[in-house]
């Protein structure tokens, strides 16, 4: 029998919060086709700003991996993630165009600002690699789990939203998230009590901000 990793143990421990982040009413409304398109548009514009802030955070995780990891493959996994962010930003632009949204005029809402503030705080050099990679994994995993749910058998996701769901719900993204989780688990196995505590706090912060981000999108209609 395979011993479960720390991240799996934490997701069990904080199951309610994790479910809140990955099975949010916003996600349910995509999946059952009742979503108000205005809410989707708000999400799209706000998430574009979030992703722009996520790039330097990802770069900071890469720097920490370079300095602190003894496993070369960590860099490759993180670099792959950064490379797909370039593609993601282009996708946001063309998707915004499709919906008639001007991204240059978007103002970040409070929950978005707060979430970007968390990213900023995790970018500080004194934040350990173990803590940063745990947060990085959690941020990606929430989107993977959420959007994959919209594509499962029996879902009634509107055709025009399927491409968005595919971005994070596809099998390749799922594997990338698993690679990040594996890295986090290996680091957490060797972490000090203090690092463990900080990583768990970071995970909880990510989950809370994700819930607020969905709430924001939904409240906009
Ligand atoms: C709010 N969380 C949010 N936006 C994203 N694009 C992701 C996670 C995944 O990259």
Image (cartoon, helix red, strand yellow):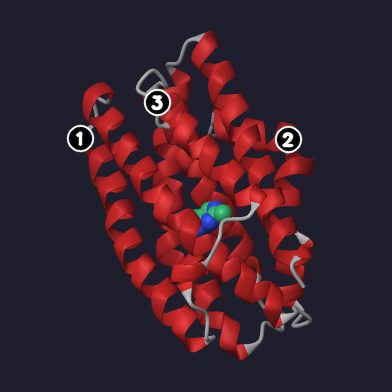
Asked if residue 197 lies left or right of residue 86, the reply is right
Q: Are marks 1 and 3 in contact (CB under 8 Å)?
A: no
Q: Secondary structure at mark 1?
A: helix
Q: Secondary structure at mark 2?
A: loop
Relative to 106, does residue 166 appear above or below in the rendering? below
**Closer to the camera, 114 or 176?**
114
Q: Quarter of the image containing the N terminus?
A: top right
The residue where tag 1 is placed is: 72
The residue where tag 3 is placed is: 124
Please tell me in which quadrant of the rendered image residue 46 appears. bottom right
- Mark 3–mark 2 Cα distance, whole angstroms, equals 26 Å
Residue in the image at 71% along x and 36% along y: 12
Q: Residues within 10 Å of mark 2 (few under 14, many from 20)?
A: some
Residue in the image at 27% along x and 22% along y: 68
Residue 26 pos. (x, y %) = 73, 66
Relative to 196, does residue 112 appear above or below in the rendering? below
- Indicate which disc, 1 or 3, sits on the residue closer to the N terminus: 1
Residue in the image at 48% along x and 79% along y: 96
**Closer to the camera, 35 or 99?**
99
Residue 204 pos. (x, y %) = 65, 33
Q: Are marks 3 and 2 in contact (CB under 8 Å)?
A: no
Q: Secondary structure at mark 3?
A: loop
Asked if residue 33 lies left or right of residue 126, the reply is right
Residue 170 in sight in this render: no
- Mark 1–mark 3 Cα distance, whole angstroms, equals 22 Å
The residue where tag 2 is placed is: 14
């Amino acid at each position: 029998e395979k011993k479960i990793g720390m991240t799996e143990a934490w997701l069990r421990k904080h199951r309610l919060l994790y479910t809140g982040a990955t099975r949010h009413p916003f996600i349910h409304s995509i999946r059952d086709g009742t979503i108000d398109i205005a809410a989707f548009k708000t999400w799209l514009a706000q998430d574009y700003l979030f992703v722009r802030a996520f790039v330097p955070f990802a770069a900071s995780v890469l720097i920490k991996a370079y300095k602190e990891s003894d496993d070369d493959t960590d860099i490759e996994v993180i670099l792959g993630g950064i490379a797909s962010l370039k593609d993601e930003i282009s996708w946001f632009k063309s998707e915004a165009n499709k919906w008639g949204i001007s991204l240059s005029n978007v103002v970040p809402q409070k929950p978005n600002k707060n979430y970007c503030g968390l990213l900023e705080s995790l970018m500080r050099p004194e934040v350990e690699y173990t803590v940063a990679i745990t947060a990085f994994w959690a941020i990606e995993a929430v989107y993977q789990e959420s959007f994959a749910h919209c594509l499962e058998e029996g879902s009634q996701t509107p055709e025009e939203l399927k491409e968005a769901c595919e971005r994070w719900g596809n099998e390749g993204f799922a594997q990338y998230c698993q690679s990040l989780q594996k890295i986090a688990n290996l680091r957490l196995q060797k972490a000090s009590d203090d690092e463990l505590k900080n990583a768990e706090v970071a995970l909880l912060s990510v989950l809370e901000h994700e819930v607020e981000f969905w709430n924001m999108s939904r409240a906009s209609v």
